[in-house]
Amino acid sequence: MAEASLPAPPREAPEVPPSPVFDRRRAWLITALIVTFMLINYADKAVLGLAAVPIMDELGISNSAYGLISSSFALLFSLAGLIVGFVSAKVSSRVLLFAMAALWAVAQLPVLFVASVPALIAGRMLLGAAEGPAASMSMHALYKWFPQDRRGLPSALQISGAALGTLIAAPVLTWLITEFGWRSAFLALAAASLAWSAVWWRTGHDGPYGEDPTQSADPPAGSTHGPSVGQRLPYRRLLLNGTVLGSIAGAFGASWAMALSHAWLPVYLRTQLGMAPGTAATFISAVSAFSLVLLLSVPPLLDLLHRHGISRRWSSGAPQGIAVTVAAVAMAAFPFTDGGTRLVLLALAFGGHAITFPLHYMTASAVVPPPQRGAVFGIVAATGTLPGLIAPYLTGHLLDSAPSPSAGYTQSFLLSAAVMAACGLIALVTIRPEYDARRLAPASTPEPPR
């Protein structure tokens, strides 16, 4: 008589790694430091435009030469963002952000010793190299402290550092420039960068989300599809899907307006609208306040809509495309208006695109595995911020070649509107995080027999 076969031993369930613990207090402390980091970052970018008129007068430089100085900031900006994005997989965010802030301080020093066009170009090139990775790497550092469904407000706050940077920097730096000369503004920013780097070195440790290869990627909420646990995908597949390309397009259009704002808006307000330095600084602060209101209200609201079932395409993708397109329409319209209408359209053209910056990171992260997120953020930032290399110099060239400064500015604003409108429409059509996450997911394997 044959022996009865013994039942097979039960199959052990695979061990599931514990979820990271959300440290609310530490996460919001890191958020505050990163907001301050971005505040200094954008004050650094704005200082040249705020000091443009006295610098041009003292050094006797043309519009084209000033545009070249402003564009030199972007010569190494995108390349540095790309390189540091890949380095971020091996170097902690604590070290990267500390090094960036320390270099910002060094970059402000050349003009304090030799006030010349070469010194300005050298300082702006070094500053651009050190600031190229700043937005993407600080967002990457921030995401390490927040789970996916809590990133809307922190992302908005990180980008709001840009608005705060201009909101606070415009009146403060203008006061320093007026009372103590334009060099004092560069010195103040160097001191601020050094102070921040010292504080960050003591407190800016990496968080628990996104670095452990056992953690899952950031799939769209409510979906089981997307890159699998610990998966790495070819960068070609990640970069050529519609969501990442659309995120790059949105960032490109918004960055075009931002580059134009930093380099030429203060000069335009003073030379074309006849504003005094203090009045121009107040208006620039008002535009930044408008951006800040949008940043603090719209992305958290969209995050809430997503948690209630609205897809990422409509809660993150479409809004950034619409924002850039609306800003483009305002950019095309304000040269042909005057009075209060012109000021409102100016604010919309140079502030209405602000929500694009946090949203394009959120849409890109929805289709990228966490171990590759820093590199992809660096690539998105590098390509999306190329307008900083083009727009300032192109505007200076148009001003010098046009029959009048007014005609040159009009040509520049209409060209900018066309670029922004094209980018906004591309973002609106191509960003589809849920669809692209499914396309990037590996083929499903059959479930083992029970």
Image: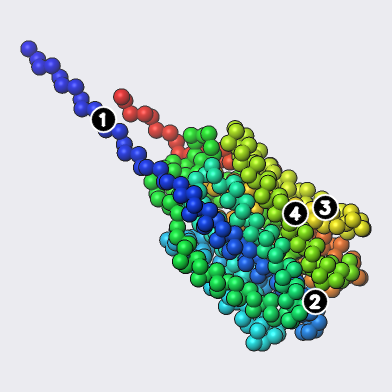
Identified by mark 4, the residue type is Phe
Q: Quadrant of the C terminus?
A: top left
Cα–Cα gap, marks 1 and 2: 75 Å
Mark 1 vs mark 4: give the one in front.
4
Image mark for residue 290: 4
| Lower sequence index among marks 3 and 2 | 2
Residue displayed at 47% across by 63% down: 203
Please identify the quadrant where the N terminus is shown.
Answer: top left
Residue occupying the point 26% across, 30% down? 11
Mark 3 Cα-neighbour bin, 10 Å: few <14, some 14–19, many ≥20: many
Report how far apart the C-alphas of labels 4 and 3 lie in the structure.
15 Å
Of residues 396 and 361, the one nearer the viewer is: 361
Q: Secondary structure at mark 4?
A: helix
Q: Secondary structure at mark 3?
A: helix
Q: Are marks 1 and 4 in contact (CB under 8 Å)?
A: no
- Where residue 114 sits, quadrant-wise, is bottom right
At 60% from the left and 72% from the top, the residue drawn is 192
Q: Which residue is mark 1?
A: 11
Amino acid on which the number 2 mark rests in the picture: Val
Residue ID for mark 2: 53
